């Protein structure tokens, strides 16, 4: 055995960070995907800047970061209010709408997975039902992600006031950092 001091892995990491212990946890990023081109632009932005293509040997020693692709389906309102009493949709209509939503969600996530090919990352997909604003924040909290990424639709002040903004809501309610990616002009 050498007379020199043997350093533990933790001590070596402390030395590299100026004496502060470093937690080498793998990064987990949640990207919200919907039908908009803005959300796919945000995904491409994240892939190009946070997860550039690399060879398998580059990351053999490191843990692969995780990218969570989230799509939130709006709940189907199975009743409508024409100029009179409420009209409820039949169970066959509700079922066909549900199947169409599932098919649409699968196609969206397949398109997103295709964009992720060639990256040395672990990918998880989630499909949730509910209000996108709330479900994005809940998923981020439940999965303990390091970063939430959403696209921006570029609504003006008046439209944002009436329609609400998912990105604005997430920026104020998510319990982790959030990145809002604006589309190019």
Image: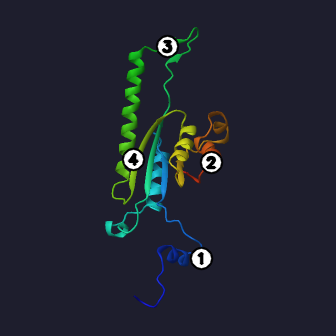
Secondary element at image label 3: strand
Given contact means CB atoms under 8 Å apart, are the residues at marks 3 and 1 in contact?
no
| Sequence-first disc among 4 and 2 | 4
Which residue position is annotated with label 1?
19
The earlier-in-sequence mark between 3 and 1 is 1
Q: How many marks?
A: 4
Up-down relation of residue 5 to residue 166 (above or below): below
| Element marked by disc 4 | helix
Q: Nearer the viewer, mark 1 or mark 4?
A: 1
Residue at 37 percent across and 51 percent down: it is: 115
Find the distance from the CA under tag 1 to the CA under tag 4: 41 Å
Q: Which mark is residue 178?
A: none
Q: Which mark is residue 88?
A: 3
Between marks 2 and 3, how big is the CA–CA gap?
Answer: 36 Å
Residue bearing mark 4: 112
Label 1 packing within 10 angstroms: few (<14), some (14-19), many (20+): few
Residue 90 figure quarter: top left
- Determine the residue positioned at 36% across, 48% down: 113
Point out the image quarter for the N terminus: bottom left
The mark lying in front, picked from 3 and 1, is 1
Mark 3 surroundings within 10 Å by alpha-carbon count, few (fewer than 14), some (14 through 19), many (20 or more): few
From this viewpoint, which residue is outermost toward the bottom?
3
Determine which residue is flagged by label 2: 171
């Amino acid at each position: 055995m050498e007379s020199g001091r043997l350093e533990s892995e933790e001590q070596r990491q402390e030395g590299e960070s100026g004496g502060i212990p470093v937690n080498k946890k793998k990064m987990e990023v949640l990207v919200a995907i919907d039908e908009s081109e803005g959300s796919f632009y945000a995904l491409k932005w994240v892939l190009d800047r946070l997860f550039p293509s690399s060879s398998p040997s580059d990351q053999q020693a490191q843990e692969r970061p995780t990218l969570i692709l989230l799509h939130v389906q709006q709940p189907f309102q199975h009743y409508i209010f024409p100029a009179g009493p409420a009209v409820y949709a039949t169970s066959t209509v509700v079922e066909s709408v549900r199947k169409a939503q599932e098919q649409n969600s699968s196609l969206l996530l397949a398109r997103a997975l295709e964009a992720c090919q060639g990256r040395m990352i672990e990918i998880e997909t989630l499909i949730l039902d509910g209000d996108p604003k709330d479900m994005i924040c809940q998923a981020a909290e439940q999965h303990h992600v390091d970063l939430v990424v959403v696209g921006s639709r570029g609504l003006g002040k008046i439209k944002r006031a009436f329609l609400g903004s998912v990105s604005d809501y997430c920026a104020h309610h998510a319990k982790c950092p959030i990145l809002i990616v604006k589309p190019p002009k």
